[in-house]
Image (tube, helix red, strand yellow):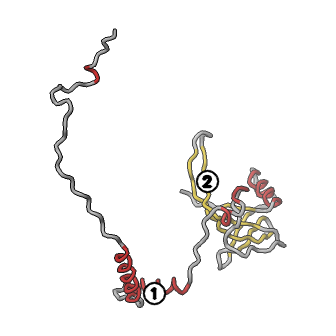
Amino acid sequence: MEEQFILRVPPNVAERIERLLNENNASSSEDKSLDLQFGEDGRSGTFVIGDEHFPASLLDLPAVVESYKTYDDNSLVKTADIGQMIMVRESGDAAPDVIECRHGLTPPMRDARKRRFRREPDLNPELVSRVEKDLLKIIAGGTAENLDVEVAEQEGEENARSANKKPAATPASKHDVPETHTNAGDADRSDSDESDESV
C-alpha cells in the first residue's frame, strides 16, 4: 500500500497548485516549485510555492480515511489508510494549539471526537505509573509492592461471597413407575393407515 496524507490549502494556493499541475511546461509558470519543510518538532513547518512561504501544521484526523483508485471506472482498489492532514494557513492565521483536527474531512464528521466516539477514561496518572512499575518488577522476576493487601482484600471478598451463596438444590429422585398403556393390545397405527371411509 502507498503512504498518503491530505494537503489542505487556502483557495488561492489551491488555484496556483492546480495551474502548476495542469501546465505541460512548468518552466513558463511563475510558480516553478513546491516545497514542504518541517521543524524539529515534526508538527509545524513551512509550505513554499514559488517565492511565497506559508505556515503549515501536521494534524491527526479524528478517524482513519481510506483512499481508492480506479483504472477502468468500474472497480476500486484501496491504496492507503490516511490518518494525518497537512493544513497550510495564510500568514496571518493563528497556529492550531492541538495536534488533532477537531473536525473530519466532510460535514457529517463535524466535531466527531465529541459527538461520535466514546470518551477516554479518566485515569489517575499515579495509579498508572504504580501499575507500570509493578508490571516491570513482575517481568523482572520480582514481586509487586501492594500485592499482599490486594490478595487479602480479594480473599475477604471471596469468603463473603461464598457465605452469601445458597447451597445448590439437588434434584428429587424419581421413583420407577411403570407406564400404563391404554391400547396395549392394538398394533401401532400411523396417520397414513387411517382411511376416509366416507368416500
Question: In the shown orientation, is residue 104 left or right of residue 144?
Answer: right
- In which quadrant will I find the C terminus? top left
- The one nearer the camera, 21 or 88, is 88
Please, what secondary structure does the residue beneath circle 1 have?
helix
Q: In the rendered structure, which amino acid carries the disc numbered 2?
A: Ser
Q: Residue at x 21, y 53 (%)?
A: 174
- Depicted 199 relative to depicted 128: above or below: above
The disc placed on residue 54 is none
The residue depicted at 59 percent of the width and 72 percent of the height is: 120
> Helix, strand, or loop for circle 2?
strand
Residue type at the position of mark 1: Lys
Q: Is residue 57 above or below residue 187?
A: below
Residue 168: percent from the left, percent from the top? 30, 66
Find residue 51 and report its horizontal and vertical position in percent.
Answer: 81, 68
Q: Nearer the viewer, mark 2 or mark 1?
A: 1
Is 7 or 22 nearer to us in this picture?
A: 7
Q: Residue at x 77, y 65 (%)?
A: 49
- Say which residue label 1 marks: 133
State yes or no: discs 2 and 1 in contact (Cβ < 8 Å): no
Give residue 150's quadrant in the image. Answer: bottom left
Residue 40 percent location from the top left of the image? 65, 79
Along the viewing direction, whichever of 147 and 194 lies nearer the viewer:
194
Residue 176 position within the rendered picture, expressed as x and y whole percent measured from the top left: 16, 49
How far apart marks 2 and 1 lie (CA) works out to: 41 Å
Q: Earlier in the sequence, mark 2 or mark 1?
A: 2
Q: Residue furthest top?
A: 199
Q: Badge 1, how many Cα within 10 Å: few under 14, some, many 20+? A: some
Residue 141 vs residue 112: left or right? left
Image position of 145 with respect to 43: above or below: below
Q: Quadrant of residue 14?
A: bottom right
Give the numbered dot on residue 67.
Answer: 2
